[in-house]
Amino acid sequence: MSMSTYARRFGIVAVSGSIYVGAVYLGIQLYGGERKGQQQALLGEDGNSTASYVLDPRRTATFQKIAYSYDDEIAKDEFVMGINLMRRALLYFHATGNVLEVGAGTGRNLGFYPSGVKKITLTDSSDKMLEKANEKLSRMSNSERARHDVMVADAGKLPFPDNSYDTIVDTFGLCSFDDPTAVLKELQRVCKPDGKILLLEHGRTKAYSGLSSYLDKHAERHAKNWGCVWNRDIDKIVEASGLTLEKLHNFHFGTTYYIVAKPR
């Protein structure tokens, strides 16, 4: 290889790496920053801010408040970090049959399910988030609307029989559930024995301690603004749930988890 060719290839790699680092940094700054009209701090009996947003179980109230602005505020972050490509790939290559999506929120996976999927049931604890999902569905074709159901449901106590679904999907929900391990166990209950559980999550990184320290430092602020605990240990949560992993890929310096699993 000539020196000029080596230099050109090195330049391409360097520029690509710089763009990737910049996108991850920008995404974290956008998603981790202050929200417009952010909610007031939780107050103790003495009027001082004493409660922990990371530990507080009333996160659904936060989702209700941010539902109508959520898509606009999260769009930049997901664009620069390529999240929609990950959503599309996860569902296109692995979702089949009758699908249950938990923590569906405003329906950010709508439009990414392959045509081979028969039925999709979207669930979330926030009815206001699901209102936005229904608005998106109303703009889709009759055939696309017909294969979707939308309902309010607690992911930790699903109103479905055992072995009900071929595929279960959760994208960026483990950061927001009060007991994410219990949720994963519940997903296994309603998943068919030969079905798949698809997860796209964010959490702390094992590869870059400085980045995890940043997530820890700003965890309270982030949970306050978004109802999301972004520094959870996804590996430990998945292991504790008993899921059988088929695929696990990490992106964004280890903070994003792309998981294909089966019930135990």
Image (cartoon, rainbow, N blue to C red):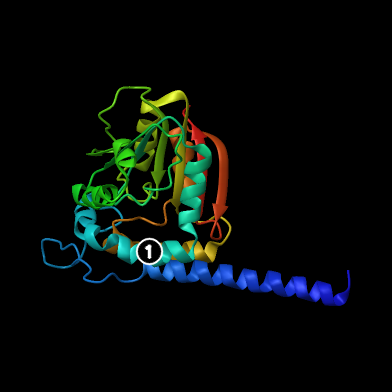
User: Does dot 1 land on a helix, a strand or a loop?
Assistant: helix
| Amino acid tagged 1 | Ala
Residue 215, placed above or below residue 170: below
Residue 219, placed above or below residue 182: below
Residue 42: percent from left, percent from top: 18, 62
Q: Judge by depth and name the residue closer to the eye, 245 or 69.
A: 69
Identify which residue is drawn at 31% across, 48% down: 140
Q: Judge by depth and name the residue closer to the eye, 182 or 37.
A: 37
Left of 65 or right of it: where is 222?
right
Quadrant of the rendered structure where residue 100 is? top left
Residue 174: percent from left, percent from top: 38, 46
Residue 74, placed above or below residue 146: below
Quadrant of the rendered structure where residue 67 is? bottom left
Residue 123: percent from left, percent from top: 28, 40
Q: Is residue 233 visible?
A: no
Q: Which residue is mark 1?
A: 75
Residue 22: percent from left, percent from top: 53, 72
Identify which residue is drawn at 22% across, 60% down: 68
Label 1 crowd bin: few (<14), some (14–19), many (20+), radius 10 Å: some
Quarter of the image with the N terminus in it: bottom right
Identify which residue is drawn at 28% across, 56% down: 227
